[in-house]
Image: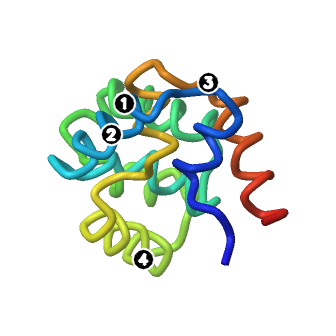
Amino acid sequence: MPALFGEIVVDMGYVTSAQIQEAVEFQKKGRAKLGQVMVHMRLLNQEQVENVLAYQKLDKGAGKVFGICVLELGLISDRDLTEAVRYQTTSKGVLGDILIHLGYLTREQRDEVIKQQLRG
């Protein structure tokens, strides 16, 4: 069984056990943002998420939720959106993204840890 993300990130010296615990508590409190979920699921990349967020600030995207904007921009299918929303409502956030949000990890470090985890 591959090592858990939290174990690897501590072993690599990127964060402390206390920081992992804080991130897990944060994770328990709420859901990940849909854009983060879509990046995690490899449906979008970070640049596409930023483009969608910019679109939401325009008149044609104003007041619309992220998922509707993604569909209007033709970035994913209805089926992919449904799957991402299902994941979002059950996952309560991706630990690597939460560690980035809390400022404990860079995106590059997260990606390095994921590569290490996949080598397992």
Expressed as whole percent of the image width and height from the top left, the position of residue 38 reads 50, 56
Tell me the residue that label 2 is attached to: 21
Question: Is 66 situated above or below 106?
Answer: below
Q: Are marks 1 and 2 in contact (CB under 8 Å)?
A: yes
Given this view, does label 2 or label 4 mark the residue nearer the observer?
2
Q: Residue at x 18, y 38 (%)?
A: 63
Give the CA distance from mark 3 to mark 2.
18 Å
Given this view, does label 3 or label 2 mark the residue nearer the observer?
2
Q: Residue at x 20, y 52 (%)?
A: 28
Tell me the residue that label 3 is attached to: 106
Instruction: Give the amino acid at mark 2.
Output: Gln
Give the CA distance from mark 3 to mark 1.
17 Å
Give the CA distance from mark 4 to mark 1.
32 Å
Tell me the residue that label 4 is attached to: 83
In the rendered structure, which disc, 3 or 2, sits on the residue that comes first in sequence?
A: 2
Tell me the residue that label 1 is attached to: 18
